[in-house]
Image (tube, helix red, strand yellow):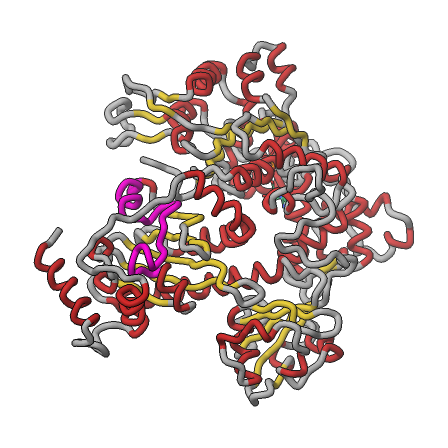
Amino acid sequence: MNARSYASHVQEIESFGLGLNRGTPARDAAVLRSWQRCIERHRLDPAATCEAYIVPEGQLRVHREESEPLIRIARSGLERLYQQLAGLQYVLLLADRHGITVDFLGHEGDADALRRAGLYLGSDWREDRAGTCAVGACLEGGEALIIHQSDHFDYTHTPLSCTAAPIYDHRGELAAVLDLSLLRSPESRSSQSLALHLVTSTARRIELAHLMERSRSDWVLRLSRSPDFLDVDPDAALTLDGAGRVRGMTQAAARILAQAIGLPWAERRDLLGLPLERFFELDVDGLPSLLRHRLAQDRIVRARDGSILFAHAIEPQRGSATPVRDATPAPSATTTATTTPVPQALRALSAGDAHLDALLHKAARLAPQRLPVMIQGETGAGKEYLARALHAASGRPGPFVAINCAAIPETLLESELFGYLPGTYTGGASRGKTGLVEAAHRGTLFLDEIGDMPLHLQAKLLRVLSESEITPLGARQPKPLDLRVISATHRPLTVLVDQGLFRQDLLFRLNAAQLSLPPLRQRQDLDALIDRLAEAQRPGLRPTPEARALLRTHGWPGNLRELHNALCHAAALSEGPCFGPEHLPETVLEASAGLPQTVATMLPRLPAPPLEPPPHVSDATDPEDPAGPADPAMALERLLQRCQGNVSEAARLLGVSRSTIHRRIQRLALGERRVRWSPADRRD
Ligand SMILES: Nc1ncnc2c1ncn2[C@@H]1O[C@H](COP(=O)(O)OP(=O)(O)OP(=O)(O)O)[C@@H](O)[C@H]1O
C-alpha cells in the first residue's frame, strides 16, 4: 500500500466529513453524496480498510435463484456488451438489489486478481459494507454513475474504476445493477464516459426485454424522442391492459409518464393503473393507429406536458389470454402443491406441449443435483438449450462449458479437454493450457455428441468422473474437480456399446438420469412456438394464415434449428407485421405439394423440386472437390441449407461421417461456433 496516497485519501474524506471541503469541484456530486452516507448513515471509517467480501456459496445460490429470470434475460445483453469491449480488460458484473454479484463476465486469466478485488461472482458491493462503490452508490441513488479510483471510500478499492447503471422492474422498483469495471484504468475519469453510455443503454435494453417477456397479453407502447430507431431500439416502453391502464413500464417510460403529469420520480409507483389518456392525447382506441404499418415519422403522440414523442404500438398476442407471468408460474410446466416448481429457465423451453412439460418437471427435480444427465433428441431438437437451462436452474456458481466432441479434431481433443502444462508439447502454448473439463470446475460440463468421443479419451474421462480430479498432460499431481456432467447424443449409445465403440462403464456413469426431447413434428405447441420465435425476430411479427398453414405442414427434420432459421429468413425478407409464404425458405414451401388445393393455389410458384438429388450432387457440393464451387465454405453452406441444417443428411449425401462435416464446419467457420464457453470460463 502506498502510504502517502493512503494518507491523502483518508485526509480528503475526513476533511469532507468535517465539512472543510464540501462542494469541492473535483468530485462528482453523486460521489460526495455517497461519502456523506458512508460517514453519517453507515458510520464507516475512511481510515479502516477491508478486502472485498465474497458471500459463501450457499448464500450465493439463494441470490442467484431469486434473480434467475433476470439473469437469463440479461445474459445475452451482457455477452454482447462484453464482446463489444473485448480486449479492453473490462469486467461485467450483474448485482442483485441486495448488492450481491449474481452474474459475471471477465477474463479467467485474471481470476485470482479479480476475486481479490471483488470483481467476481458472489462479491458483496453494498454501500454499508464496501463504502462508496459503483454498485452500492447506484443502489442507493438509483442513478447511473462512475466511481473512479479515489472516488472509492475504502482505500482498498482505489485501483478500480467502476461504472454502473440501475435496472428497474416493470413496477419501477430497482431490481439490479449492471456494472462495468476495470482493475487498472487510465488516470482520467472522463476515460469512463463511453463505459457509462454502454452500461446505460444495455440496462435499458434489458429492461425492455424484461417488460416484453412478461407482457404477452398486454398492449405494448414503445416510445422514442426520434423516429429513427423507434422500431428497433426504442427509448422507452410501457404495457397497457385492455382498458388502456398502465400495467408496466421501463425506467425511461416511468420518467416520461411522471414528467407528463408532473409527478415526482419518487412517487413513480403511483403511475401504475392510471389510464393512458392521463399522460397523452391518446386512449386505448387510438393504439391501432400506431401499429407498424404506418411510417415511424407519422406515428406521433403528444404528452400532456406538451412534449412530442414517436410511438410504436404492439398488439396483445392472439390466443395468449394467460395472465402475466412474473414469479407466477404458467399453468403448464409449473407449480402444483405436490410438484417441484419449474424454474423460469426451464419453463421458457415449452410453449405448452404436454410431453415436454412433463420432461421439464423431471428436469426441475434433477437440476439442483449433481447426478449426470444424458439428453437424447434429434439434431436441432434443443439438447444444448436444455443443458444450459439445467445449468441456469442448478445454482452452481461455476460456468457452463460446452464441448462438441464431434467437432474437435481427434488429435486436439485430448489437450482441449484435459489441458497441458508448459513444455508438454512442441508448439503448445508456452504457458500451458487449462482444459475445458477443468474450466467447468464448480459449473457444468456439457459433452455434446458424446458418441463421437474416441475410446482412449473415454477411459480418461471415466477416470476424471470416478475420481473427481484431473491430471493435465505433463502434470504429476492431480487437481480436485467439482463437476456436473450433462451429455447429449442423437446416436443409440447402447448400439455403440454392442459394437465396442463406446464403453459401457462410461455409459452407466453418464446416463444416471435421462431426458428425451421430442422432435418438433411431435410437439403440440408448434403454433405458440412459431409466434414466440417470430416475436423474437421482430416484435409483432406473425405469419399470414397461408404461411402458418405451410409451417404446420412441414415435417421439420432440422427441428427447432430449422424453425428458427425459417423465421430468420421470413423476418429478413418481409416488412411490416406479417410474413407470407413468399418469405419462407424453399425447403418449407416444398411442403405445399401436400397441401389442400385452396392453400396451395395461394403460394408462389416454385420450380418443381427434383425427386432425386442430381447425379452431380456430391461433386458440386463437396467443399473439398476441386471441380466444385470455388468457395468451399459457400458449397458446404449450400449443402447444409439444402439439407435444412441436418448434418446427418449432408454427411449421407457426401458419403462422409457426421464428424467430418462438423470438422469442416468448424474449419470453414460456418454457422455457430461449436465449441463454446463463456468468456469467463477459460483459465489459461
Ligand atoms: N427452446 C428453444 N427456443 C428457441 N430456439 C431454440 C430452442 N431450442 C433450440 N433452439 C434453436 O435451435 C438451435 C439448435 O439448438 P441446440 O443446439 O440446443 O440443438 P441440439 O439438439 O443440441 O442440436 P445438435 O444435435 O445439432 O447439436 C438453436 O441455436 C436455436 O436457434
Quarter holding the C terminus?
A: top left
In magenta stretch: residue 122: yes
Where's residue 321, x and y in %?
Answer: 77, 59
In which image quadrant can residue 212 be found? bottom right
Residue 605: x and y, percent? 80, 54
| Residue located at (81% from left, 45% from top) | 553
Please report the bounds of the magenta region as a residue range. Answer: 109-134
Where does residue 167 sit, x and y in percent of width and height? 48, 62
Q: Identify the residue at horizontal 53%, vertical 75% (top origin).
A: 267
Of 190 and 414, the residue lying toward us: 190
Res 609 seen here: yes
Q: Is residue 370 toward the left or the right of residue 300 in the image?
A: left
Residue 545 in the image: x percent, y percent? 82, 58
Q: Within the magenta stretch, is there residue 328?
A: no
Seen from the viewer's position, the closer of residues 313 and 661 is: 313
Using the image as rendered, state which of residue 553 and residue 652 is in the foreground: 553
The image shows residue 295, relative to residue 653, as above or below, that is: below
Which residue in the rendered view is the most extreme toward the right?
597
- Tally of numbered discs: 0
Q: Quadrant of ligand 1?
A: top right
Residue shown at 31% from the left, 60% from the top? 133
Q: Say if 573 sits above or below 527 in the image.
A: below
